[in-house]
Structures are given as C-alpha cells and as structure tokens.
Image: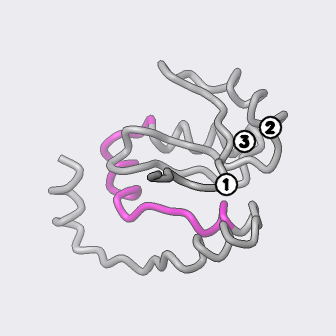
Amino acid sequence: SIYRAYDSAETESIRSVEPVVSALRSGNVPALASAVGNDLAPVTRDLVPEVAELERTLEASGALGASMSGSGTAVYGIFDDEGPAERAKGTVDAPIIGVYEPVSRGVEIV
C-alpha cells in the first residue's frame, strides 16, 4: 500500500501550509501552483506511474502546477485561465475529468 511504502521510505514532511494560505489570500495563482504538494506523491508515483503521467500531461498542457490529492485518487492541475484548462481536458485520458473554478468562501451555517 501507499501508506506502507511511505512509512518504509522514512521521509519527513518539509512542507508548510503557510505559502498555500498566503497565495490563496492574495489571489496569486502562480504562487499557489508552486506551493501545493503532497508528501505521499513520491511513493505514489513509484507505485502508480499513471499519477506522474497525468501530472506531466497537465503541465505540458499549460497547468502552472499539477499534483495529486490524498493518496492519489485524484490528480489536478492549477491553471490561471479557463481557456487552457478547457483545452487540457482534451489531452487527458482519464475516466472522470472536469474544469472547476474556486469559490470565494466555504460553507455557511445559518
């Protein structure tokens, strides 16, 4: 499993959430693209080469950055414009693909 491989690799996270938060607050898409990452990505890419292939495809299609969520069940690209994101959809061979835009705020309880 990916988690077992990660534990065996004895890697240590060096990521901080602060650059991601700062990029989100300022609306700096290139900074966000360079700040995101996933500690499980290196071992997942070794075990599931399709993850790395999807990341490369998205970046070659204009994504400012690409990574995976969780243990690799989803791969995403960060684009600064909807046009390149829509065009990238046609280059990715995946069962489910979509272009989604961020929302300005989360859930509100009233």
**Left or right, 83 with reference to 51:** right
**Left or right, 86 with reference to 19:** right
Q: Relative to the observer, which residue lies in front, 16 or 88?
A: 16
Q: Position of residue 46 (x, y in %)?
A: 35, 49
Whether residue 80 is situated above or below residue 75 in the rendered picture: below
Kindly report which numbered mark, 2 or 3, lies closer to the viewer in this rendering: 2
Dividing the picture into quadrants, the one containing residue 64 is bottom right
Q: Which residue is at a point 67% across and 49% down the rendered structure image?
A: 78
Badge 2 crowding class, 10 Å Cα cut-off, few under 14, some 14 to 19, many 20 or more, is few
Identify the residue position indicated by label 2 in the image. Answer: 82
Q: What residue type is labelled 3?
A: Ala
Helix, strand or loop at mark 2:
helix
CA separation in Å, label 2 and label 3: 16 Å
Whether residue 77 is situated above or below residue 54 in the rendered picture: below
Q: Which residue is at a point 65% across and 47% down the rendered structure image?
A: 102
Q: Which residue is at a point 75% across and 72% down the rendered structure image?
A: 26
Identify the residue position indicated by label 1 in the image. Answer: 104
**Left or right, 62 with reference to 59:** right
Identify the residue position indicated by label 3 in the image. Answer: 60
Residue range corresponding to the magenta coloring: 32-50
CA separation in Å, label 1 and label 2: 16 Å
**Left or right, 88 with reference to 13:** right
Whether residue 37 is situated above or below residue 86 in the rendered picture: below
Q: Position of residue 101 (x, y in %)?
A: 68, 41
Q: Relative to the observer, which residue lies in front, 44 or 28?
A: 28
Helix, strand or loop at mark 1:
loop
Pointer 1 with pointer 2, Cβ within 8 A: no
Would you say residue 35 sits in the magenta stretch? yes
Q: Which colour scheme is used?
A: one colour
**Which of pointers 1 and 2 lies earlier in the amino acid sequence?**
2
